[in-house]
Image: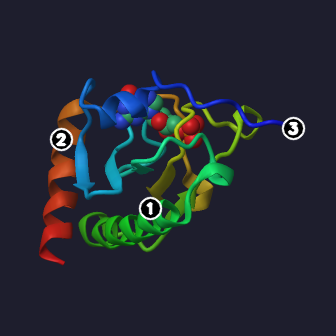
C-alpha cells in the first residue's frame, strides 16, 4: 500500500505560507499550532510540522520531536485555560482512518472520551475561536 503523494495546495500548507488565516496559538521554527475550525470539543487545537509530510510514516525525527514538544506546551495551556483533566491526543493516518487534510497533524482535544463530538462536522463560532486562541497563547507565554 503506497502513501498518497503530498499535495502542495492542501489547506494547512496554505496556512504555513500565510495564504489563508488561522487562529494561531503558538509558532516556532518547526511547528504551528492553531484552533480547529470544526472542533470536536471546546478548545480543540491542531499542531502541524513545517515539513511536507502527509502522515506519520513520512515525518522526519526532528519534526516529530518538535510537534510533540509543541503539543506538550499546548496541552498544559489547555489544562489551565479550560480546566479539563482529559485531553485526547489524536492523529489520523490515511482516508480510511478518517484523515481529511493530508498534511500531518496532531489533534489535542480537551474532553471526556464519551463526550467527544463528531469529527470535522460543525463550524465553530469565530469570535469564540479568537478568544480561545488568545487565552491559550497567553498561557503558553506565561508558562
Ligand atoms: P483530519 O481529519 O485530517 O485528522 O483532521 C483535519 C482537521 O482539520 C479537522 O478536525 C477539521 O475540522 C480541521 N480543518 C479543516 N479545514 C480547516 C481550516 O480551514 N481551518 C482550520 N483551522 N481547521 C480546519
Separation of residues labelled 3 and 2 (CA atoms)? 40 Å
Residue 81 on image: x %, y % = 24, 65
Q: For this rendering, which residue is in front, 85 or 15?
A: 15
Asked whether the beta carbons under mark 3 and mark 2 sit within 8 Å of each other, the answer is no
**Numbered label attached to residue 26:** none
> Looking at mark 1, is its residue's CB closer than 8 Å to ligand 1?
no
Q: Closer to the camera, 64 or 38?
A: 64
Q: Give the SS element for disc 2.
A: helix
Asked if residue 118 can be seen in this view, the reply is no
Which residue in the structure is indicated by mark 3? 1
Residue 77 point in image, percent of width and height: 28, 68
Where disc 3 sits, the SS reads loop
Tag in front: 3 or 2:
3
Please give the name of the residue rendered at 18% of the width and 59% of the height, measured from the top-left corner.
137
Binning the other alpha carbons within 10 Å of mark 3 as few (below 14), some (14 to 19) or many (20 upward) gives: few
Crowd band around label 1 with a 10 angstrom C-alpha radius: few (<14), some (14–19), many (20+): many
Q: From the viewer's perspective, is 26 left or right of 74?
A: left
On-image quarter of the C terminus: bottom left
Residue name at image x 55 percent, y 58 percent: 60
Q: Could you say where residue 24 lies in the image, as x and y percent from the top left?
A: 23, 46
Return the residue at label 1.
Answer: 67
**88 lies left or right of 83:** right
Cα–Cα gap, marks 1 and 3: 26 Å
Label 1: state its secondary structure: helix
Judged left or right of residue 34, residue 89 is: right
Q: Residue at x 64, y 46 (%)?
A: 92
Residue 130's disc is: 2
Is 67 displayed left or right of 78 in the figure? Answer: right
Which residue corresponds to the image point at 24% horizontal and 56% vertical from the top-left?
26
Asked whether 10 or 51 is in front, the reply is 51
Amino acid at each position: 500500500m503506497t502513501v498518497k503523494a503530498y499535495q502542495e495546495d492542501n489547506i494547512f500548507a496554505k496556512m504555513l505560507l500565510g495564504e489563508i488565516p488561522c487562529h494561531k496559538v503558538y509558532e516556532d521554527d518547526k511547528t504551528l499550532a492553531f484552533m480547529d475550525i470544526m472542533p470536536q470539543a471546546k478548545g480543540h487545537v491542531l499542531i502541524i510540522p513545517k515539513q511536507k509530510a502527509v502522515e506519520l510514516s513520512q515525518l522526519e525525527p526532528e519534526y516529530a520531536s518538535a510537534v510533540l514538544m509543541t503539543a506538550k506546551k499546548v496541552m498544559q495551556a489547555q489544562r489551565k485555560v479550560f480546566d479539563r483533566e482529559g485531553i485526547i491526543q489524536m492523529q489520523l493516518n490515511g482516508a480510511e482512518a478518517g484523515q481529511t487534510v493530508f498534511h500531518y497533524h496532531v489533534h489535542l482535544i480537551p474532553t471526556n472520551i464519551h463526550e467527544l463530538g463528531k469529527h470535522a462536522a460543525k463550524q465553530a463560532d469565530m469570535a469564540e475561536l479568537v478568544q480561545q486562541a488568545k487565552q491559550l497563547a497567553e498561557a503558553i507565554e506565561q508558562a
